[in-house]
Image (cartoon, coloured by chain):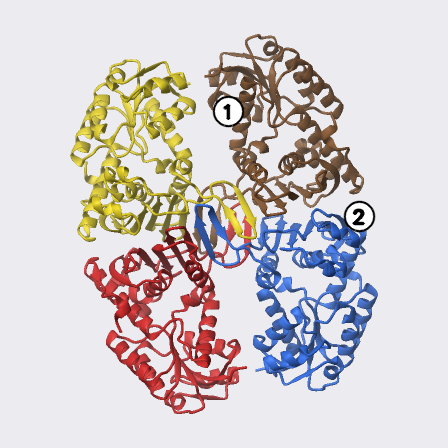
Chain colours: A red, B brown, C yellow, D blue
């Protein structure tokens, strides 16, 4: 058995707490030794609840602790750059929630620091770990659909997030479609070379205040000659709806489902099954599997399935889509991302 | 083009009227020339509505008309024997609703008359014409599932028929399961050699008065070594539910569906589609296709897909199942039906 | 019973022959009295096969026959204008395959002639008659999904048509997406106010010669404030794939299915069902129902579900989409179509 | 946080090893402190692999260890009685794989010892913990289908187990259908009052040597007035197929699915998805959830969802079904199990 990896989590908000519990209760090979959160007594409370030996309000306590091997960064995006640089400089491997940083420039900086310090960095694009998307990846690689020529992605939120969230979300292309851009690159095995983005406020007028929309559509082209479209929506009244269709020269793959449980209720009103309500339910497995992979990469010194560079490319695409949308759908050509570093 | 077949329908109740309209409006090669019903002015009314040239209250008018080639008999079961014998003796080909006759003895009689007069006889086991069951038949014959070894049949009525109907229905095995016995024989390509039948009144206490049940189950064995089970129910609250599963040595075939329309409504309560409400909706195609086949058999002098002998064998099985049920589930061995005539 | 409508069909190519058989064999109230085709002996052969009393190589024979009430025009698009004008001037009601005419100017002309001569004109947008799309329409009108805010349409051909066809098809937006534009307008109960169209040749390089693509995507906006996207593809290797998703403020409706038969084959390789292979199979009901409606409109002097004006608006949208695509996805604003005549 | 429960596992065969790994890696609140297996060096190897502090070839080492709170018994059925009695007498709570014991008499004995020593006993009927069956239970209790009146259970093994296994399996009713008897009692909220069992060797002739069959069917009646049927099969070539349908007076519930992954492959051969291959895949969640509940019951001194009495009743039903089958399907009335202890 490999040596246990000693991990601390930074940031104990909703998702940070969720990652922390997963690490503590379910991830083989990880030992949660400290939790950090600057706000109130959240770190102390979580430590007590989970029986973690140490807690702090100051991330530096973790960075300077020689007994800590790795950190999981779930702090606000605006602090990612600083956290990553400190982690890398102290030789801590790290997992960081997407997006990598706030700007492309900062992304370049942190990628340099990561490389110089030779630490493992994994970014939280969890769809790559979802069993359905991953099964699709393996089937495509096995040649089950020939050469993939079209990608269709759907990301629909069950309910619109509150105005306070939308305001700081970066817009629908950066907040939602970025997951489809990433998984499209992964599944198609190709880089996106152009984007044209459109959007409309069809239901929530307040969106306009922030130059944001509740329906977004990006038409994308790949350096393999393939194309695709990506819908993002804040208007789904039927549940959290995440699907993909990949059309290949020999067949197609459809990813995703609606059914939340393997029970169907039938009565005179018809057949009825519950639809997946939220992202935690849909990606429950994926969130665990990505942390398991992170620990494994640390222990075996392997490159993770989602790198800092991947994350930077995704940001670049999402920013270009946002610009395209703001320019009335203008097509924006991206330099082939593969050679960009 | 073949000569048009001149047809009369006998009996204009719900199903008789339905067959009559199908013949008149949709069946290629048939010309409806007369309609007969002894009750009130039903024949006159239907003739006027459909623009049929002739009508009568007396079936003999049809039998004696040399210009009529074939009749469709949808009169009460108690009159089938008489109608069939008259039709055959006057050289009229006929389609008759199931069951062939009221008793096995009468079935033997009419089979003899049919043979002597060399007329085409087709019985209304419409499932054999349903595109889904027929597709299963073709796939089994093509070897898609290897040798079929188990048959599972489900026949569930949406709502329980009224007491008046149940009283004269002959019981659930004769009224419902007979369709599964027939289609099981057809799909398995084998004859049933034993039945054990069980049943319970789980919802409609009045059934007990008639020694009938609202849930019936028949365990069956075939001369091919295969086995099967057949559920009949008067208790489905979710719709008209007709399905079959055929297990073979190389694969399985599932027949049937719930969805009535290709639309699905999704909302916060889940996914919802309408379920098939009744037998006319479910077997709409089959009712038309069986009449088309009947006309074709008459025109080309071919044996229909369901013969009088099939119908007699089905009755024999259903009567044995009823006896088994009344004797507490006792296994009743049937002489191999294939050699019985 | 209403007086039978005496009909002639003009054009006996693949679709013309299909309509002709439907009219002759299945459409209540219609009597096929003549068939016309200028090529070889096609008209004579079809008349013989179906037992039609009259045939001709010259459409004028039909227009001048006072005993003919209505015509079904399935001639090449380039002749639609002439056929329609002649039909209208001779007082013949007519059904015409889409598109109405070759140009918007010609569409204006024929609409004027139709109005002056007060004849019934129905255009072949058969999706409005498909039971699934029509069920969706009724549910939307019943308020089942609240106010519709987003339309997603998918039209995927099983195999790419031959180069000879593509050459004269008018391009993917006019040939394929026009069906989605029409059904989107119908289902959303709103007119399209802008289009932005994109496309890529992902598989069939020969398309480039004709400025055409094998994958097209149109982003659309409606005068109700709703939006939508429409994919058209010549690359489906899994079957003929026609679906729609309509998102409303209270729920969603999904239209369409893959399953061609209600049988599923299961074996060690998994579950398998046959997918719909072609448009005749998918829209078998719709093609019949639209002709039935046409005859009914003629007999009852009602306006058909798809008018000449509808058809003109659809052309306008498709032409704008084509222009947008050729201009790199430029957004093209359409005058609100409702007031255009 | 509650005190950690210190657990040892007895028996490290396939299922024992699986339970051991679940306990060690995933079950919150449990600490695996010892593993026991008498054969070869299996205990030593598993202890080394998992990093467990102690191992032994002798169960008594565990029973006599005052630091062990609970044991998980996955030894051969013939040893269950002895293991249970020792565990109880040493005050160890225990989880035991089904069946409880080899005979009803031994079941009575162990139930007495359990009661005298006041230990928690949970038996491995894992279906009660499967999210789909459990969801059905909650919906039935919530009244979603009214009063349940019919239960239909299907249990189909993907491939027939080897002759060596069948020989000692106790027959298909004890080995397979017992799971359906248990879940039927649980879902219907009622006890089984009669069984009639049938069976046939349809594929594997060697079964006959052991008076066993590869297709079994049990018709059951409940003290609530409901009825049901239970199919068991060793002949499924399409995968591991476990489903249930519960018909109620207001609606129905269908439990179970075929799809193993949320990906569907579509090509010219049709739609294809992988089917669940085996019980570990199908009941992966259930096997973990039952152990989590066991630990929780130990820590909170609660009665488990499946008790020793449940297990004894299930055995009684399975033995009666076996007897009924051997007597040609004779109906066997069971004393109402609820009062039996």
Q: Nearer the viewer, residue B151 or A8?
A: B151
Label 2 chain ID = D
Q: Residues within 10 Å of mark 2 (few under 14, many from 20)?
A: many
Coordinates of residue D121 in the picture (x, y in percent): 72, 72
Q: Which residue is mark 1?
A: B22
Coordinates of residue D336 in the picture (x, y in percent): 78, 56
> Residue shown at 72%/41% (left/top)?
B221
Residue B27 drawn above or below residue C282:
above
Quick one: quadrant of the C terminus of chain B?
A: top right
User: For residue B206, which numbered disc appears in the image?
Assistant: none
Q: Which residue is mark 2?
A: D331
Q: Is residue B151 visible?
A: no
Quick one: quadrant of the N terminus of chain B?
A: top left
Q: Residues within 10 Å of mark 1 (few under 14, many from 20)?
A: some
Q: Nearer the viewer, residue C271 or B240?
A: C271
Label 1 chain ID = B
Residue B173 drawn above or below residue A168:
above
Query: Callout 2: helix, strand or loop?
Result: loop
Residue D149 drawn above or below residue B155:
below
> Which image quadrant for residue C56?
top left
Left or right, D79 with reference to D6: right
Task: Kindly check if marks 2 and 1 are in contact, taking CB atoms under 8 A apart as contact.
Answer: no
**Labels 2 and 1 share a subunit:** no
Coordinates of residue B207 in the picture (x, y in percent): 71, 38
Coordinates of residue D100 in the picture (x, y in percent): 75, 67
Q: Is residue D79 visible?
A: yes
Q: Nearer the viewer, residue B29 or A341?
A: A341
């Amino acid at each position: 058995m490999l040596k246990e990896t000693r991990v601390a989590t930074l940031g104990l908000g909703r998702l940070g707490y969720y990652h922390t519990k997963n690490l503590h209760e379910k991830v083989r090979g990880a030992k949660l030794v400290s939790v950090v959160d600057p706000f109130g007594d959240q770190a102390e409370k979580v430590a007590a609840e989970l029986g973690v030996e140490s807690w702090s309000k100051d991330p530096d306590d973790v960075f300077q602790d020689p007994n800590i091997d790795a950190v999981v960064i779930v702090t606000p995006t605006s602090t990612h750059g600083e956290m990553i640089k400190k982690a890398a400089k102290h030789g801590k491997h790290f997992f960081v929630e997407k997006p990598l940083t706030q700007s492309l420039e900062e992304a370049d900086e942190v990628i340099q620091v990561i490389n110089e310090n030779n630490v493992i960095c994994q970014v939280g694009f969890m769809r790559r770990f979802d069993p359905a998307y991953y099964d699709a990846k393996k089937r495509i690689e096995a040649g089950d659909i020939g050469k993939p020529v079209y990608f269709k992605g759907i990301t629909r939120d069950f309910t619109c997030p509150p105005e306070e969230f939308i305001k700081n979300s970066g817009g629908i292309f950066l907040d939602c479609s970025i997951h489809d851009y990433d998984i499209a690159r992964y599944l198609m095995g190709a880089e996106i070379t152009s984007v044209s983005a459109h959007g409309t406020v069809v239901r929530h007028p307040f969106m306009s205040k922030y130059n944001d929309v509740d329906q977004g559509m990006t038409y994308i082209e790949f350096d393999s000659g393939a194309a695709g479209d990506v819908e993002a929506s804040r208007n789904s009244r039927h549940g959290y709806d995440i699907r993909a269709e990949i059309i290949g020269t020999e067949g197609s793959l459809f990813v995703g489902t609606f059914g939340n449980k393997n029970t169907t209720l039938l009565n005179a009103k018809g057949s009825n099954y519950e639809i997946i309500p939220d992202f935690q339910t849909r990606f429950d497995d994926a969130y665990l599997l990505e942390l398991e992979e992170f620990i494994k990469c640390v222990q075996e010194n392997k490159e993770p399935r989602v790198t800092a560079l991947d994350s930077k490319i995704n940001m670049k695409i999402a920013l270009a889509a946002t610009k395209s949308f703001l320019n009335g759908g203008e097509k924006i050509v991206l330099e082939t991302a593969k050679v960009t570093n």
